[in-house]
Amino acid sequence: MRHTASLLLLAACSSSPPYPEFAGDPALPLEVELSIRDVSGGLTTLADGMRVPLIEAPQGGKTIFVAVRARNLYTGAVELMGLVRDGTVDGQDPILGLEKRPVDFALAADGWAYPVEPDQLSSYSNIALCPNYKSSRDIYEEAYQVTVEVEDRSGRRGGRALMVTPYCGVPAEEQSCRCQCAHGYHHGQCTVGPNRSAVLASEVWR
Amino acid sequence: MFQRFGAILLLVGVVACGDDDDFTGVTLDPANTTGVKFETQTFEVPQGAEIQDCYFFNMPDLANGQDYWVDRVRLGSNPGSHHANVFRVKTIVALGTPEQGDFVHDGECFKSGNWADWPLVTNNQDSSQDSGYFDWTLPSGVAYRFSPGERIMVQTHYVNATTQTTPFKGKVVLDLYRSTMTSPIEMGTLFATQQSIRICRSNPTPSYHGTCSFSSGDVTIAAANGHFHSRGTQFDIFKWDGVSVEQPPEGERFYRSVKWDDPPMTIYQDPSSMQVGEHGGIWWTCDYDWYEPLAEFGGCAALDAADKQQAGDCCYTFGPKVETSEHCNVFLYYYPKKDRTDITCF
């Protein structure tokens, strides 16, 4: 009850939409389910050991896009944090990519809260993995730990961590993806672009 | 060896600057007699316009075919500049093609995916009339390495609209000063950007956080600056241990900008306080405050029309246009460069 009152006050002060409302049971811990987005925008529920596609992000680089549904939390503005670690030891191994973003969630008929704009890339955890200068291995076809944590405005937190194996998710970009996601990548190493017409500047200008 | 570079200067031309009697514009340094010089022409920035131009040149042969070192950079912009960025050209996709020659106006020059693997050399966001130059002598014993013939892009972005104005004319100059050191420590650069950002009416004060790690750690940060547009209220960069999932404590913060149109380029004089250990990197945050877009740029209708998902929430999304989109970019300089690579994080 105290959470509800404070959240309504928050909403009024920040001009947020008329939610938040509570999705689920306040007596239960925040529960999270993850899905992975493929290149065509389809979603597959994420499970331990699953292969996940690396997709070219709008500005460049290869990213995995993790979608979240959650319950037992206040809807409205929710913080998503996504990260990938180089290994399996919780909290010990280097983080290869971490980002944190606000996403608006709303209650759906099935009792779970989903992003209000589910098709937007901004509604996903955008975990950029390539190029990567930290991993001791290739990014593709190797197992890594992905974690997504959710925090609502009241401070309720929950998340999931799973082992996944990234792979180059766009057949036409396989060669450039494997180059950019290889251990030891450096700038200008990959001259085959998505349209197979890319060249290295030094080959045409010197 | 200077003939080739002389041709470049001839091509870009030198035009007398401005109509204002009190303003002379940025100029090359006549004292730079052994290094590399480049300047754009002087150009009009019409009222209401945003202009982004990409200029290309090849580094001259200054050392009989061998690589050489640069230990001072001086990048000057006439007031009104939104940014001047310098990159090493690597993979050519749709920008910097032989057909385009040495100059591209707007178009492909606005599409950041075209330079996704082009390492940063230097940048300047100084838009004031008082200074206009980023003039930096690198830390003692540190220098950039260049190869003869290496392709370079100088990108200029001028705005003469509402949130930013260009009172005179646009112009950018670049001096690279050759070092006499024989085996300096190599300067590295880091460019990082947070993508898929949205600043919307329904969630008007969002914060976005990103991280970026150095390849081997054990580096020293020499300078940094952050870049966002007019919805940006605070840009912070912290040293990060590369392992923790919490935002680093305030004591680890080494950069803050609260002035989107003239952000500081912070140069760190004490290297002992700027070292990043093994696994380490940076954590940065961009805070925004949404406001109603101006009617002269189409108001919310224009933003909604540009929103691919037609969310109808008057969202500023990731993009280069100052008036209608947002950025969250880090420009950072460190040494030593390791594993033959600069750093880019998306």
Image: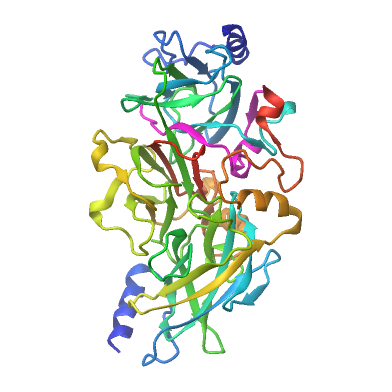
Q: Residue at x 34, y 55 (%)?
A: B241
Seen from the viewer's position, the closer of residues B223 and A13 is B223
Which color mode does the image show? rainbow
Q: Residue at x 66, y 30 (%)?
A: A201
- Asked if residue A40 lies left or right of residue B223, the reply is right
Seen from the viewer's position, the closer of residues B193 and A114 is B193
Q: Is residue A163 above or below residue B141?
A: below
Residue B110: percent from left, percent from top: 60, 39
Residue B308: percent from left, percent from top: 63, 59
Q: Is residue A157 above or below residue B220?
A: below
Identify the magenta region. Answer: B101-129
In the image, is residue B108 part of the stretch drawn in magenta?
A: yes
- Asked if residue B252 lies left or right of residue B312, the reply is left
Seen from the viewer's position, the closer of residues B44 and B30 is B30
Residue A96: percent from left, percent from top: 48, 58
The count of marks equals: 0
Q: Is residue A123 visible?
A: yes
- Asked if residue B100 lies left or right of residue B261, the reply is right
In the image, is residue B322 part of the stretch drawn in magenta?
A: no
Q: Is residue A91 above or below residue B2?
A: below
Q: Residue at x 57, y 8 (%)?
A: B2
Q: Is residue A14 above or below residue B325?
A: below
Tell me the quadrant of the picture where the N terminus of chain B can be found.
top right
Q: Residue at x 59, y 29 (%)?
A: B54
- Residue A185: image quadrant is top right
Residue A6: percent from left, percent from top: 29, 80
Q: Is residue A117 visible?
A: no
